[in-house]
Image (cartoon, helix red, strand yellow):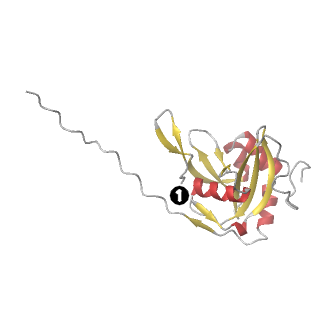
Amino acid sequence: MKSNRMMLSPLPSPTAGLSFGKRLSCGIVFLNDEAELLLCHVTGHDHWDLPKGGGADDESPLQTALRETREETGLVLDPAGLLDLGCLPYRARKDLHLFAARVPRFDTGLLWCESRFDDDASGTRLPEMDGFGWFSFADVPVQCSRKLSVVLRERLDLPALLAQLRRREPSVLQFMPAPPPAPAPSTWLPPPRLTA
């Protein structure tokens, strides 16, 4: 193992390595027994990402990771099955606190994103994530941003992480049903007024 890779155990405390003034983004690394990683396509960008995001002041990293995963994928997980990977350097002003889960390979068509943002170009609210897929570990540098690729390939050792997760029971997950599609806006216009 390279010396710059994080050892998977023992784990650091949730705040270990978090520098003053940095934001913390929390998420989950989903792996399956086919040595694939679940990634979410970021709407309007050319890269894929982990389900992750920032937390509220009253949330623990675990609570944030679970909520962000639910909001960005519709997946609800039992926290008992997660492996805490601790806090990892990510960007100059942001660190990641990641957890890992081993799950069966499922149909990513069951996933959906409830969190939205205002798109200035279209004037509509779009989902943060607009696609989901399973990718081999070798696909990470091609599909992910350079910074996330460094985390996944250099700070973590994905094959070793999967081997460690295989010694545990797979995580229990549930798929939240997607909401029904919003009705199309009405095209009805009142009849023109007749003038005398």
Name the residue nearer the viewer: 184 or 133. 184
Question: Which residue is situated farthest in the front direction here?
Answer: 58
Give percent across and percent down for residue 14: 81, 55
- Quarter holding the C terminus? top left
Q: Secondary structure at mark 1?
A: helix
Give percent across and percent down for residue 195: 11, 28
Residue identifier under label 1 = 109
Give percent across and percent down for residue 122: 46, 35
Q: What amino acid type should be assigned to the residue bearing mark 1? A: Gly
Q: Residue at x 58, y 67 (%)?
A: 174
| Location of residue 101 (image quadrant) | bottom right
Q: Residue at x 87, y 61 (%)?
A: 9
Question: Which residue is situated farthest in the top direction here?
Answer: 196
User: In the image, 15: left or right of 148?
Assistant: right
Give percent across and percent down for residue 164: 81, 65
Q: Residues within 10 Å of mark 1 (few under 14, many from 20)?
A: few
User: In the image, 105: left or right of 159?
Assistant: left
Name the residue nearer the viewer: 92 or 112. 92
- Quarter holding the N terminus? bottom right
Q: Is residue 60 above or below residue 81?
A: above
| Location of residue 38 (image quadrant) | bottom right
Q: Residue at x 50, y 33 (%)?
A: 120
Question: Which residue is situated farthest in the bottom direction here?
Answer: 169
Count of number-bearing discs = 1
User: In the image, 191: left or right of 27?
Assistant: left
Question: Which residue is situated farthest in the left direction here?
Answer: 196
Q: Residue at x 35, y 47 (%)?
A: 184
